[in-house]
Amino acid sequence: MIFGDYFNAMDRSYGSIEPQDVKSDAQVGVDTTSLGPQELGTSTNPMMHQVQAFAAKIREGASKIEVSFMGAGKSNSQQPSPEAFGAKDRADIRSMAEINDIKTSVHAALHGESLAGLGREGFSGEGRQHALKEIERAINFASEATKGGAIVFHTGEWIRPMSEIEDKAGAKFLSHADEAQQAPVIVVDDQTGAIQHIRKDHYVFEPKFLTAADVEKEQGKKVIGTTDANGNQIEADDWIDMKGNAIKREWLVSTDNDKIERMFDRIPRWNEGKTNFDVEKRDFSHFEEEAKKLSQKLGQEVAPEILFFKSQLANQVLQYKGNALFHGQHYSEYKKMRDKTREALNFYEGLEKDMPEDQKWKLMKQMNYGDFIPPENMLPSDYLKEKLLGYENQMRYIHESSAESDARAKEALERMNRLKTVEEYGIHKTAETIGKAGLMARQYSDSHRKELNESIFVAPENWRPEQFGSHPDEIRKIVNESRKYMQNQLVREGLSEKDAAAKAKEHIKATVDIGHFNLWRQHFQAKEGESPEARHKRFEKWMLDETEKLAKEGIIGHIHLTDNFGYDDEHLTPGQGNVPMKEFIKRMEKAGIRDIISEAGSFNGTTVMHDTWALVGSPVYGVGRLPTFRGMREQHLGYHSPAPYIVGAYSPSNEWKLWSETPME
């Protein structure tokens, strides 16, 4: 009996309309009927035994399941890895997938390293191999336990300033208010993978070198516009050497050793009044301006960080060469004196040998050491031996000091030629790792073709916005470069360019996690005078447009649905955060992407899949008025109304029985 709004929890008439069945902006499905349980799957609990976790998802009604792993390296019961499940477990999972017609994918363990192999000491082959090993373990598992599909792993290659992202759509981002001034700047040694880095608010002092403009101003000589002895036309900002020849600024970023060597012919400006050489304070903005000028002059991009570190290395070379020259300036003189002394020593040693002992006193030379030290009489040979030792010690000192400085100068000069930007170096290492993983995916797919419903493909996933590999332009670049690496390897094996390209595209595709993309929201910069609401709408359009482009270009092969409010990766149920989820799903469907996994979070492991089906309006087929999938689940569990059966304390005493003796449950 209901009196007004009063009801009792056991009143059967309550719940005739479930809250989930009342249409609202958050619950109305997209205008499509093609996506539902067959396309929208879910992931297993990564902290469970995966045979049990896989079976649990089948019982929940999943038609598509992603087997998830958290444990990298040696696993444990809380964080198992693919290798923790042996042949029987793998056979059981595959049998369940075959019997229940389950489409599969695998999430590889979180390996922790960047795919490019970046660690504390720089980039290393060891780091890349560790990441690749975890991917291969997942590929191996997939080939023996699943029916094929995506092998998902995160990209998190290196930190790069958001303020410097040149978004093709014109969007601007900022990690924090001072990022543009304090952003890290990194360069890499192309040979060793070692990194050097500074912050943008760092500054240095450099010698001030004589330029053509200085010569005209101070000496009144016309040099600008003339041609020097080497055939170079002299420009105002060219440096000038002691012979009046030009030293071009662009030679500093050249890989031609002869041109780089000319940097050391520059003339530091002498300050007569202070009796020292002039120096200038340089901050990073100076090198950004110089790099911009050189880029325009050369018609190619010159990175300011390369210019900065090359300038510092050039100054080191200048110092080393100066040390070598300082120590070596008397070397010829000492060498000449040593040789003369050695000749004299040979002469007097021969003379003393033939002279009687009682006559040698005639050759004695008196050595005076000072007013307070008594004189000493010495034979010419002894005297010359001391002089010879002194000259040889001087030459040895010059050898060690000057040679060391020359070696350091040569080393710094070589390093100048090996410097690369972190992206220029890292993207090739990332592509190498993913390309090798793609080759493995092809190999395992071919060797298990009979057991698989589809090919295994590797699917790098966008991760945190702070790291390279999360922006849409970066995802595109990573996938294309990785496919290029795999294609080149297959061509070497004998495939045609066309077939190799097709295989690379088949086995390397991106995973897009829309929840991870939504984390860019907090960094998306508003236009001047733009309201918060307008900014959010513009961000959502950017996110939807960019992911749609990736899908239409054939970059995306796998989708993760997670939701959040743009602050952190909380894995809310799709539709429960502020991701424009339904529009995103609609666009992905239109682009032909149907491989979609709704990933669980901390509190929605058993509800996320049904709630996602309800979100898109997937129908429950039957006769009469139909609830949503969410409504069915919540009615069954009694979240908002009594369950259609009673158990436990609600049941009558076990002593009371129906005439049929059927238990009440």
Image (spheres, grey):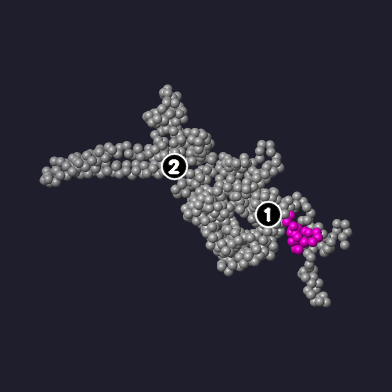
Residue that mark 2 sits on: 416
Q: How far from the left and from the top, in percent, is residue 252?
A: 45, 37
Q: How crowded is mark 1: few (under 14 residues within 10 Å), some or many (20 or more)?
A: many
Q: Which quadrant would the N terminus be assigned to in this image? A: bottom right
Q: Which quadrant would the C terminus be assigned to in this image? A: bottom right
Q: Is residue 640 left or right of residue 251?
A: right
91 is higher (above) or lower (below) than 111: below
Q: How far from the left and from the top, in percent, is residue 223?
A: 42, 25
In magenta segment, residue 628: yes
Q: How far from the left and from the top, in percent, is residue 212?
A: 44, 28
Query: Residue 108, can we see it?
Result: no
Nearer the observer, 657 or 574: 574
68 is higher (above) or lower (below) than 356: below
Q: Residues within 10 Å of mark 2 (few under 14, many from 20)?
A: many
Nearer the observer, 397 or 654: 654
User: Residue at horizontal 47%, vertical 55%?
Assistant: 493
User: Which element is circle 2 on?
Assistant: helix
User: Residue at horizontal 49%, vertical 52%?
Assistant: 491
474 is higher (above) or lower (below) than 638: above
In magenta segment, residue 139: no
Q: Is residue 249 left or right of residue 651?
A: left
Please provide the residue range marked out in magenta. 616-637
Query: Residue 221, can we see it?
Result: yes
The mark that comes first in sequence, 2 or 1, is 2
> Residue 285 got which mark?
none
Residue that mark 1 sits on: 572
**Picture quadrant of residue 646:** bottom right
Determine the CA span between mark 2 and mark 1.
Answer: 49 Å
- Three-letter code, disc 1: Leu
49 is higher (above) or lower (below) than 20: below
